[in-house]
Amino acid sequence: MASRREFLGGLTALGGVYLLGPSYGKAGDPATGVCSSGGGFNPPAEYELPPLPYPPDALEPHIDKQTMEVHHGKHHAAYAKGLNAAIKGLADARASGNFDNVQQLSRLLAFHAGGYFNHIVFWHNMAPAGKGGGGEPSGALAEQIKKDFGDFGKFQAHFSAAAAAVEGNGWGILAYHPALQRLTVMTMMNQQDLAPIAAVPLLMCDVWEHAYYLKYQNKRADYIKAWWNVVNWKDVEIRFATVA
Ligand code: MN3
Protein backbone atom coordinates (compact mmCIF):
# COMPACT_ATOMS: atom_id res chain seq x y z
CA MET A 1 0.00 0.00 0.00
CA ALA A 2 1.33 3.44 -0.83
CA SER A 3 1.76 5.85 2.02
CA ARG A 4 -0.43 8.90 1.93
CA ARG A 5 2.57 11.06 1.10
CA GLU A 6 3.59 8.86 -1.81
CA PHE A 7 0.04 8.77 -3.03
CA LEU A 8 -0.42 12.52 -2.96
CA GLY A 9 3.02 12.94 -4.50
CA GLY A 10 1.87 10.88 -7.44
CA LEU A 11 -1.22 12.92 -8.12
CA THR A 12 -0.67 15.19 -11.04
CA ALA A 13 -2.39 16.57 -14.07
CA LEU A 14 -5.91 16.85 -15.31
CA GLY A 15 -7.67 19.46 -13.32
CA GLY A 16 -7.39 18.51 -9.69
CA VAL A 17 -6.40 15.86 -7.23
CA TYR A 18 -9.98 14.77 -6.69
CA LEU A 19 -10.17 13.49 -10.25
CA LEU A 20 -7.59 10.84 -9.65
CA GLY A 21 -8.17 7.60 -7.86
CA PRO A 22 -6.11 4.63 -6.91
CA SER A 23 -5.40 1.83 -9.28
CA TYR A 24 -4.99 -1.79 -8.37
CA GLY A 25 -3.21 -2.80 -11.52
CA LYS A 26 0.18 -1.44 -12.39
CA ALA A 27 0.88 2.12 -11.27
CA GLY A 28 -0.66 4.64 -13.60
CA ASP A 29 -2.97 2.12 -15.24
CA PRO A 30 -5.56 4.12 -17.15
CA ALA A 31 -7.79 1.07 -17.49
CA THR A 32 -8.64 1.00 -13.81
CA GLY A 33 -8.54 4.60 -12.70
CA VAL A 34 -5.02 5.91 -13.04
CA CYS A 35 -2.38 6.55 -10.44
CA SER A 36 -1.26 4.80 -7.34
CA SER A 37 2.09 5.53 -5.80
CA GLY A 38 4.53 8.35 -6.37
CA GLY A 39 6.20 9.35 -9.60
CA GLY A 40 6.38 7.38 -12.79
CA PHE A 41 3.04 8.44 -14.19
CA ASN A 42 3.45 9.14 -17.87
CA PRO A 43 0.27 10.32 -19.52
CA PRO A 44 -0.44 8.87 -22.94
CA ALA A 45 -0.22 11.12 -25.98
CA GLU A 46 -3.91 10.43 -26.61
CA TYR A 47 -6.46 9.12 -24.14
CA GLU A 48 -8.35 6.11 -25.44
CA LEU A 49 -11.65 4.60 -24.39
CA PRO A 50 -10.78 1.81 -21.94
CA PRO A 51 -12.80 -1.40 -22.30
CA LEU A 52 -15.59 -2.25 -19.87
CA PRO A 53 -14.37 -4.72 -17.22
CA TYR A 54 -17.35 -7.03 -18.03
CA PRO A 55 -19.74 -7.61 -20.96
CA PRO A 56 -22.41 -4.91 -21.46
CA ASP A 57 -25.23 -7.26 -20.38
CA ALA A 58 -23.43 -8.39 -17.18
CA LEU A 59 -25.32 -5.98 -14.90
CA GLU A 60 -28.79 -7.07 -16.08
CA PRO A 61 -31.48 -6.74 -14.91
CA HIS A 62 -30.41 -3.79 -12.76
CA ILE A 63 -28.66 -1.93 -15.55
CA ASP A 64 -29.68 -2.94 -19.04
CA LYS A 65 -27.39 -3.88 -21.91
CA GLN A 66 -28.51 -1.11 -24.26
CA THR A 67 -27.89 1.58 -21.65
CA MET A 68 -24.42 0.18 -21.00
CA GLU A 69 -23.58 0.03 -24.72
CA VAL A 70 -24.64 3.63 -25.36
CA HIS A 71 -23.20 4.92 -22.11
CA HIS A 72 -19.78 3.35 -22.66
CA GLY A 73 -19.53 3.32 -26.44
CA LYS A 74 -20.97 6.78 -27.10
CA HIS A 75 -20.92 8.94 -23.96
CA HIS A 76 -17.66 7.78 -22.41
CA ALA A 77 -16.02 7.75 -25.84
CA ALA A 78 -17.06 11.37 -26.35
CA TYR A 79 -15.32 12.40 -23.11
CA ALA A 80 -12.08 10.77 -24.29
CA LYS A 81 -12.33 12.67 -27.56
CA GLY A 82 -13.17 15.94 -25.78
CA LEU A 83 -10.29 15.50 -23.35
CA ASN A 84 -7.81 15.02 -26.20
CA ALA A 85 -9.23 18.05 -28.02
CA ALA A 86 -8.96 20.27 -24.93
CA ILE A 87 -5.36 19.21 -24.28
CA LYS A 88 -4.47 19.88 -27.91
CA GLY A 89 -6.27 23.23 -27.87
CA LEU A 90 -4.26 24.35 -24.85
CA ALA A 91 -1.00 23.12 -26.41
CA ASP A 92 -1.83 25.08 -29.57
CA ALA A 93 -2.54 28.17 -27.48
CA ARG A 94 0.83 27.89 -25.77
CA ALA A 95 2.57 27.36 -29.10
CA SER A 96 0.97 30.39 -30.72
CA GLY A 97 0.86 32.59 -27.65
CA ASN A 98 -2.82 33.25 -28.37
CA PHE A 99 -4.78 32.67 -25.17
CA ASP A 100 -8.04 34.27 -26.32
CA ASN A 101 -9.89 30.98 -25.76
CA VAL A 102 -8.16 29.93 -22.55
CA GLN A 103 -11.30 30.28 -20.42
CA GLN A 104 -13.35 28.03 -22.69
CA LEU A 105 -10.50 25.53 -23.10
CA SER A 106 -9.95 25.38 -19.33
CA ARG A 107 -13.63 24.63 -18.83
CA LEU A 108 -13.59 21.94 -21.53
CA LEU A 109 -10.49 20.35 -19.99
CA ALA A 110 -12.15 20.14 -16.56
CA PHE A 111 -15.43 18.82 -17.99
CA HIS A 112 -13.96 16.15 -20.26
CA ALA A 113 -11.19 15.09 -17.89
CA GLY A 114 -13.92 14.65 -15.30
CA GLY A 115 -16.15 12.71 -17.65
CA TYR A 116 -13.28 10.53 -18.81
CA PHE A 117 -12.07 9.62 -15.34
CA ASN A 118 -15.43 9.47 -13.52
CA HIS A 119 -16.68 6.75 -15.86
CA ILE A 120 -13.57 4.62 -15.35
CA VAL A 121 -14.22 4.65 -11.61
CA PHE A 122 -17.92 4.02 -12.19
CA TRP A 123 -17.41 0.94 -14.41
CA HIS A 124 -15.02 -0.61 -11.89
CA ASN A 125 -17.30 0.28 -9.00
CA MET A 126 -19.82 -2.19 -10.42
CA ALA A 127 -19.93 -5.96 -10.84
CA PRO A 128 -22.69 -8.47 -11.67
CA ALA A 129 -25.21 -8.89 -8.85
CA GLY A 130 -24.28 -11.82 -6.64
CA LYS A 131 -20.94 -12.22 -8.43
CA GLY A 132 -19.04 -9.42 -6.74
CA GLY A 133 -21.93 -6.94 -6.89
CA GLY A 134 -24.16 -6.04 -3.96
CA GLY A 135 -24.00 -6.69 -0.24
CA GLU A 136 -21.98 -4.56 2.15
CA PRO A 137 -18.32 -3.61 2.52
CA SER A 138 -16.06 -5.35 5.00
CA GLY A 139 -12.78 -4.68 6.80
CA ALA A 140 -11.29 -1.23 7.18
CA LEU A 141 -13.82 0.43 4.89
CA ALA A 142 -16.74 -0.99 6.88
CA GLU A 143 -15.13 0.32 10.08
CA GLN A 144 -14.58 3.77 8.59
CA ILE A 145 -18.18 3.93 7.35
CA LYS A 146 -19.36 3.07 10.84
CA LYS A 147 -17.12 5.74 12.35
CA ASP A 148 -18.09 8.52 9.95
CA PHE A 149 -21.76 7.74 9.26
CA GLY A 150 -23.01 5.72 12.24
CA ASP A 151 -23.72 2.49 10.38
CA PHE A 152 -24.02 1.16 6.84
CA GLY A 153 -27.78 1.77 6.66
CA LYS A 154 -27.37 5.43 7.57
CA PHE A 155 -24.58 5.83 5.01
CA GLN A 156 -26.67 4.14 2.31
CA ALA A 157 -29.71 6.32 3.05
CA HIS A 158 -27.55 9.46 3.00
CA PHE A 159 -25.85 8.48 -0.28
CA SER A 160 -29.15 7.54 -1.98
CA ALA A 161 -30.84 10.79 -0.92
CA ALA A 162 -27.89 12.92 -2.02
CA ALA A 163 -27.64 11.18 -5.42
CA ALA A 164 -31.39 11.42 -5.99
CA ALA A 165 -31.34 15.14 -5.16
CA VAL A 166 -28.67 16.13 -7.69
CA GLU A 167 -30.17 18.91 -9.80
CA GLY A 168 -29.93 17.84 -13.43
CA ASN A 169 -26.83 15.91 -14.47
CA GLY A 170 -24.26 14.73 -11.98
CA TRP A 171 -22.99 12.13 -9.56
CA GLY A 172 -23.42 10.80 -6.07
CA ILE A 173 -20.02 10.06 -4.54
CA LEU A 174 -18.49 8.44 -1.51
CA ALA A 175 -15.09 10.07 -1.15
CA TYR A 176 -12.20 10.00 1.28
CA HIS A 177 -10.59 13.29 2.15
CA PRO A 178 -6.97 12.65 3.22
CA ALA A 179 -6.55 16.02 4.90
CA LEU A 180 -9.80 15.69 6.86
CA GLN A 181 -9.15 11.98 7.36
CA ARG A 182 -12.78 11.13 6.91
CA LEU A 183 -15.23 9.74 4.41
CA THR A 184 -17.77 12.15 2.98
CA VAL A 185 -20.83 11.77 0.80
CA MET A 186 -20.73 14.48 -1.79
CA THR A 187 -22.47 15.29 -5.03
CA MET A 188 -21.00 16.58 -8.23
CA MET A 189 -22.88 18.53 -10.86
CA ASN A 190 -22.02 17.69 -14.46
CA GLN A 191 -18.55 16.09 -14.35
CA GLN A 192 -16.66 18.35 -11.97
CA ASP A 193 -18.64 21.04 -10.16
CA LEU A 194 -19.13 21.13 -6.35
CA ALA A 195 -16.36 18.60 -5.71
CA PRO A 196 -13.88 19.63 -3.00
CA ILE A 197 -10.26 19.63 -4.09
CA ALA A 198 -8.31 16.67 -2.65
CA ALA A 199 -11.33 14.48 -1.94
CA VAL A 200 -10.63 11.11 -3.58
CA PRO A 201 -13.66 9.34 -5.03
CA LEU A 202 -14.11 5.75 -3.89
CA LEU A 203 -17.64 4.99 -5.08
CA MET A 204 -19.44 6.93 -7.78
CA CYS A 205 -23.04 6.65 -8.97
CA ASP A 206 -23.75 8.27 -12.33
CA VAL A 207 -27.13 10.01 -12.14
CA TRP A 208 -27.07 11.66 -15.55
CA GLU A 209 -30.27 10.62 -17.34
CA HIS A 210 -28.20 8.67 -19.90
CA ALA A 211 -27.25 6.29 -17.07
CA TYR A 212 -30.82 5.12 -16.46
CA TYR A 213 -33.46 6.70 -18.67
CA LEU A 214 -33.96 3.85 -21.17
CA LYS A 215 -34.97 1.47 -18.39
CA TYR A 216 -36.12 3.70 -15.53
CA GLN A 217 -37.31 6.86 -17.35
CA ASN A 218 -37.78 9.62 -14.76
CA LYS A 219 -37.61 7.26 -11.78
CA ARG A 220 -34.06 8.02 -10.67
CA ALA A 221 -34.65 6.76 -7.14
CA ASP A 222 -35.62 3.33 -8.53
CA TYR A 223 -32.38 3.23 -10.52
CA ILE A 224 -30.32 4.11 -7.44
CA LYS A 225 -32.11 1.43 -5.42
CA ALA A 226 -31.31 -1.17 -8.10
CA TRP A 227 -27.75 0.12 -8.47
CA TRP A 228 -26.85 -0.97 -4.94
CA ASN A 229 -27.24 -4.57 -6.20
CA VAL A 230 -24.27 -4.13 -8.52
CA VAL A 231 -21.92 -2.14 -6.29
CA ASN A 232 -18.54 -3.86 -6.25
CA TRP A 233 -17.48 -3.31 -2.63
CA LYS A 234 -14.16 -5.11 -3.15
CA ASP A 235 -13.21 -2.41 -5.65
CA VAL A 236 -14.27 0.32 -3.21
CA GLU A 237 -12.29 -1.32 -0.40
CA ILE A 238 -9.15 -1.46 -2.55
CA ARG A 239 -9.51 2.22 -3.47
CA PHE A 240 -9.96 3.09 0.19
CA ALA A 241 -6.88 1.07 1.21
CA THR A 242 -4.76 3.07 -1.22
CA VAL A 243 -5.62 6.45 0.27
CA ALA A 244 -6.46 5.95 3.95
MN1 MN3 B 1 -22.36 8.99 -17.67
Image: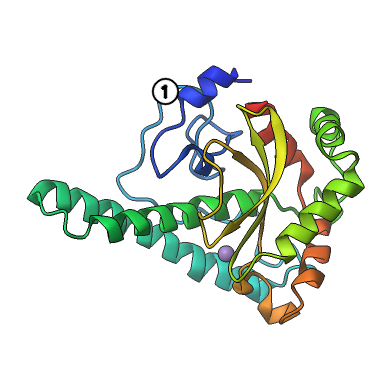
- Residue at image coords 53%, 24%: 7
Depth order, front residue of 234/184: 184
> Does 181 sit left or right of 2 as displayed?
right
How many numbered callouts?
A: 1
> Does 98 sit left or right of 183 as displayed?
left
Residue 211 percent location from the top left of the image: 64, 69
Quarter holding residue 199: top right
Give the colour scheme shown.
rainbow
For residue 226, above or below residue 244: below
Quarter holding residue 56: bottom right
The verdict on label 1 being within 8 Å of ligand 1 is no
Secondary structure beneath dot 1 equals loop
Residue lying at the far left of the rendered structure:
96
Residue 36 percent location from the top left of the image: 54, 29
| Disc 1 packing (10 Å; few <14; some 14–19; many ≥20) | some
Where's ligand 1: which quadrant? bottom right
For residue 92, above or below residue 209: above
Which quadrant of the figure contains the N terminus?
Answer: top right
Residue underneath mark 1: 39
Q: Is residue 4 visible?
A: yes
Which quadrant of the figure contains the C terminus?
Answer: top right
- Residue at image coords 58%, 35%: 23
- Residue at image coords 41%, 44%: 15
Depth order, front residue of 159/52: 159
For residue 97, above or below residue 16: below
Residue 96 percent location from the top left of the image: 8, 51
* Residue type at tag 1: Gly
- Residue at image coords 63%, 58%: 171
